[in-house]
Image (spheres, grey):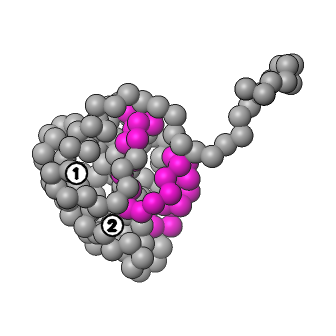
Amino acid sequence: MSASTLPPLLQRLIDERGAQRVEPDTLDAFVAQPGDRVIFLSGDPVQFPEGLDVAVVLPELQAALPGRFEVGVVPLDSQEAIARRFGSQRWPALVFLRDGQYVTTLAGMHDWTEYVQLVGSALAQPTSRAPTIGIPVVSANSAPSCH
């Protein structure tokens, strides 16, 4: 399997469950769509086998919260770049977005009851700034400050 080929369980999310394939060149268009969206970063299935568990549970989470969110599946070779953009550092991860804005990230696999609660909570949260590592931009004309 090449890096851009999806493992069968991830491909099935696209073929049978209506998820969209999301790569760096299609990410902005996916994110810009209205409503709640979840980017699924499965991680390498050999290193992170629980990513395949999340692939099985994700459609069930959508069914438990009908019409609440759309899913984007990221090929393995694009996951690092997309994860970095949203500050995600663990696999598997679900990155929640709303109306083009970051909301939160849920990492790892969870028990069913906890997962439904966590996803419901994520869908209720306001948008926020992604926890990326960055250097704050300061105007050249601003006075120095220790705060």
Q: Nearer the viewer, residue 121 or 9?
A: 121
Q: Secondary structure at mark 2?
A: helix
Measuring 42% from the left and 53% from the top, which residue is drawn there? 22
For disc 1, the neighbor class at 10 Å (few under 14, some 14 to 19, many from 20) is some
* Location of residue 19 in the rendering, given as x and y in whole percent from the top left corner: 28, 52
Dot label at residue 38: none
- How far, Cα to Cα, is label 2 from label 1? 14 Å
**Quarter of the figure that contains the N terminus:** bottom left
Measuring 34% from the left and 46% from the top, which residue is drawn there? 38
For disc 2, the neighbor class at 10 Å (few under 14, some 14 to 19, many from 20) is many
| Dot 2 amino acid type | Gly
Question: Is there any visible trace of residue 103 in the rendered image?
Answer: yes
* Location of residue 3 in the rendering, given as x and y in whole percent from the top left corner: 47, 73
- Is residue 85 shown in magenta? yes
Dot label at residue 51: 2
Give the residues in magenta.
Answer: 76-104
**Quarter of the figure that contains the C terminus:** top right
